[in-house]
Image (cartoon, grey):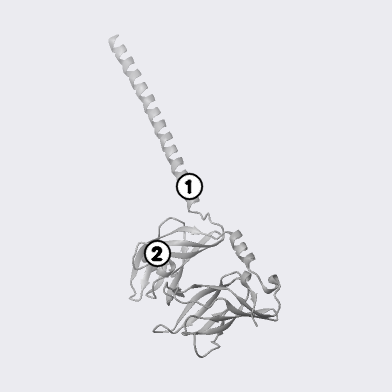
Amino acid sequence: MKKKLLVLVLSAVMAVGMMSGCGAKSDTSDTKAKTAESSSAKEEETEEQTECELEDGTYTAEFKTDSGMFHVNEANDGKGTLTVKDGKMTIHVSLVSKKIVNLFEGTSEDAQKDGAELLEPTTDTVTYSDGATEEVYGFDIPVPAIDEEFNVALIGKKNKWYDHKVKVTNPQKEADGEAAGASEDKKTVEDLKLEDGEYTVDVAMEGGSGKASVDSPAALEIKDGKITATIVWSSPNYDYMIVNDEKYEPVNKDGNSTFEIPVDAFDYKMPVTADTVAMSTPHEIEYTLQFDSASVAKAEE
């Protein structure tokens, strides 16, 4: 009788153990399933985060690297031009010199494999704070994601590859409304209903080192609806100007450099280039000239 009772007790214990084991196994399976679901959700979330959330267009963005030798030229304040098209991003950066001859989005190991597509340089002209200009290499680099590090390998003139980490951050786009407003601010001869004749106009200049200036007010001539301004520099060392891709020579031989250039509109920063021979070698310097429509007045006879 005691033996039968002992067998029954042992059987009950084994049954409970088996049930507990099944329960534990079930719990483990549930845990694994939940973990898998969680991992899958995280992967989907990561994929969503790496997708481009920027609208198609052009932005300025910071380009950060892990190297003191490989970085954006100081003239560009650590920034490049980010282009977004069809959801794909590319940033153009101007480097410090022409010593880096190729880049590769990825590791140096992959860059040296057959079929690797290397990034070819462009020749960029940068303008420094003192007005000096220099030609350097620039590159269009594919950007997989904003605010995330990615690999970029480079090769220099010594034919040796180096690995680097880079990151693109803080993209900034000018609002469409602001851009449109700037365009609407421009005023033409027709807008101001100016007749042909001689006028004066206040002109503001920006660019270069800030040492140079132009005379203001400037003489203005309107003929057949076209505007010509006489620009007198504060220096005799400017030997030509470029406006709308056209080159203009000085109209004087003595005194400060004087040019007669076309003006396409008032009240906006019109880009011009002026070449100076004041330095050891000639330098083209970028400026803007803004002609104030409110100041236009008939020239005294």
Residue furthest to the front in view is: 301
Residue 152: numbered disc: 2
Quadrant where the C terminus sits is bottom right
Query: How far across and how far down the image is residue 173, in percent?
Result: 53, 60
Whole-Å distance between the Cαs marked 1 and 2?
Answer: 25 Å
Could you say whether the residue bearing mark 1 is in a helix, strand or loop? helix
Pointer 1 residue: 45
Query: How far across and how far down the image is residue 207, in percent?
Result: 48, 72
Query: How far across and how far down the image is residue 105, in percent?
Result: 42, 64
Query: Residue 267 is drawn in which quadrant?
Result: bottom right
Query: Residue 251 is drawn in which quadrant?
Result: bottom right
Query: How far across and how far down the image is residue 230, in percent?
Result: 58, 81
**Residue at 61 percent of width and 77 percent of height:** 200
> Within 10 angstroms of label 2, few (less than 14), some, or many (20 or more) residues?
many
Could you say whether the residue bearing mark 2 is in a helix, strand or loop? strand
**Residue at 56 percent of width and 57 percent of height:** 55
Callout 1, which amino acid? Glu
Callout 2, which amino acid? Val
> Within 10 angstroms of label 1, few (less than 14), some, or many (20 or more) residues?
few
In depth, the one of 296 and 258 nearer the eye is: 296
Does the rendering let one see residue 42?
yes
